Image (cartoon, helix red, strand yellow):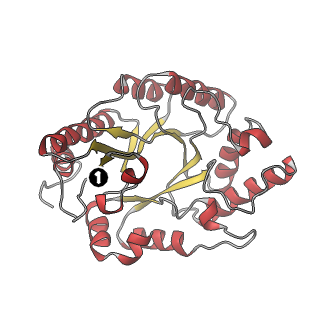
């Protein structure tokens, strides 16, 4: 939100190039309710207002996560108190943006890398049923919103993807309103997730909507033209798989400029993960996506 609030070039590119926006941190619990019972809607409202003013849709992120929680939230108190706080939070946030946010990441990163349920305050205190509860509460607050479970590292076939597939199948069999699966897709330029196309296909065949929710493609520093072309190929391939799959309803990049990317601070030795460099110049990845969208008649012109 800092870039949106203070950087004119950022706002111009965001308004010009994108049909949808996702709240990065502005809708996370720790940001929205820093003091118990006192919500601060300034940043999240500003994002929604920006989207409305520019004819963009809003993807909400995220209602339940194991991090970015308010400091006041009890971690080892009454089970019923914690459950009620979670219900109240989800209901309050989704109700405020009812009809303004078309989709929500209801539960984010629920699985560990080996496919087991992630050890979080929610699992320890509430048990695994918290996932189903969260979806039911969100659906009750806005029956028209599309509800996703969102995770990383499940784009290709593997233990985590298999576990996610089974989890979603169990939830839906129990009547839980899980409408789709979000694949974060924080990728590297020198590799592709194994079996990604087939993996997306099996989720689609299960009747789920799919979304690429947080795509970035990091390169090992220093940056070279060859690496940027390699990066462009990964971006293009992921978009192609989404466009080839009718169930894929949303394609989102996680930040669009290296000027504000989270990658260098988290993945040592990597960077340059976005479509624009730190000076807001479009990179080969931008051109690759724009060209493919034009070829598929998703947009009308290849020129910016």
Is 132 on the left or on the right of 279, as rendered? Answer: right
Can residue 109 be seen in the rendering of this structure?
A: yes
**Residue designated by label 1:** 274
Instruction: Name the quadrant of the N terminus.
Output: bottom left
> Which residue is found at the position 80% from the left and 54% from the top?
84
Q: Residue 158 appears at what percent x and percent y? A: 47, 22
Q: Along the horizontal axis of the image, is 99 left or right of 249?
A: right
Q: In the rendered image, which quarter contains the C terminus?
A: bottom left
Q: Is residue 244 left or right of residue 225?
A: right
Q: Locate residue 270: give its quadrant.
A: top left
Residue 182 higher or lower than 85, as above or below: above
Position of 13 relative to 151 (above/below): below
Image quarter of residue 303? bottom left
Q: Secondary structure at mark 1?
A: loop
Dot 1, crowdedness within 10 Å: few (<14), some or many (≥20)? many
Q: Position of residue 206 (x, y in %)?
A: 50, 26
Expressed as whole percent of the image width and height from the top left, the position of residue 212 reads 40, 42
Residue 135 relative to residue 79: left or right = left
Considering depth in this image, is 9 or 272 the residue closer to the camera? 272
Return the x and y of residue 285 as percentages of the image width and height.
20, 47
**From what the image shows, is residue 233 above or below residue 28?**
above
């Amino acid at each position: 939100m800092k870039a949106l609030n203070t950087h004119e070039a950022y706002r111009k590119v965001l308004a010009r190039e994108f049909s949808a926006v996702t709240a990065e941190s502005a809708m996370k619990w720790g940001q929205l309710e820093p003091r118990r019972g006192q919500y601060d809607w300034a940043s999240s409202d500003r994002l929604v207002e920006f989207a409305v003013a520019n004819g963009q849709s809003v993807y909400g992120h995220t209602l339940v996560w194991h991090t970015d929680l308010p400091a006041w939230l009890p971690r080892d108190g009454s089970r019923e108190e914690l459950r009620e706080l979670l219900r109240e939070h989800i209901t309050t946030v989704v109700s405020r943006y009812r009809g303004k946010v078309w989709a929500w990441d209801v539960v984010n990163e629920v699985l560990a890398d080996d496919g087991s349920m992630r050890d979080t305050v929610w699992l320890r205190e509430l048990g695994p049923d918290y996932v189903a509860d969260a979806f039911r509460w969100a659906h009750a607050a806005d029956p028209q919103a599309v509800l996703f479970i969102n995770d990383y590292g499940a784009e290709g076939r593997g233990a985590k993807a298999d576990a996610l597939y089974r989890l979603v199948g169990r939830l839906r069999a129990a009547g839980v309103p899980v409408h789709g699966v979000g694949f974060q897709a924080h990728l590297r330029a020198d590799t592709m997730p194994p079996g990604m196309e087939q993996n997306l296909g099996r989720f689609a065949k299960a009747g789920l909507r799919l979304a690429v929710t947080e795509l970035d493609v990091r390169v090992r520093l220093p940056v070279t033209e060859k690496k940027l072309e390699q990066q462009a190929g990964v971006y293009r391939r992921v978009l192609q798989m989404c466009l080839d799959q009718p169930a894929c309803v949303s394609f989102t990049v996680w930040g669009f400029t290296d000027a504000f990317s989270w990658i260098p601070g988290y993945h040592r030795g990597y960077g340059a993960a976005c479509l624009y460099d730190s000076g807001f110049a479009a990179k080969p990845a931008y051109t690759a996506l724009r060209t493919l969208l034009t070829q598929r008649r998703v947009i009308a012109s290849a020129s910016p």
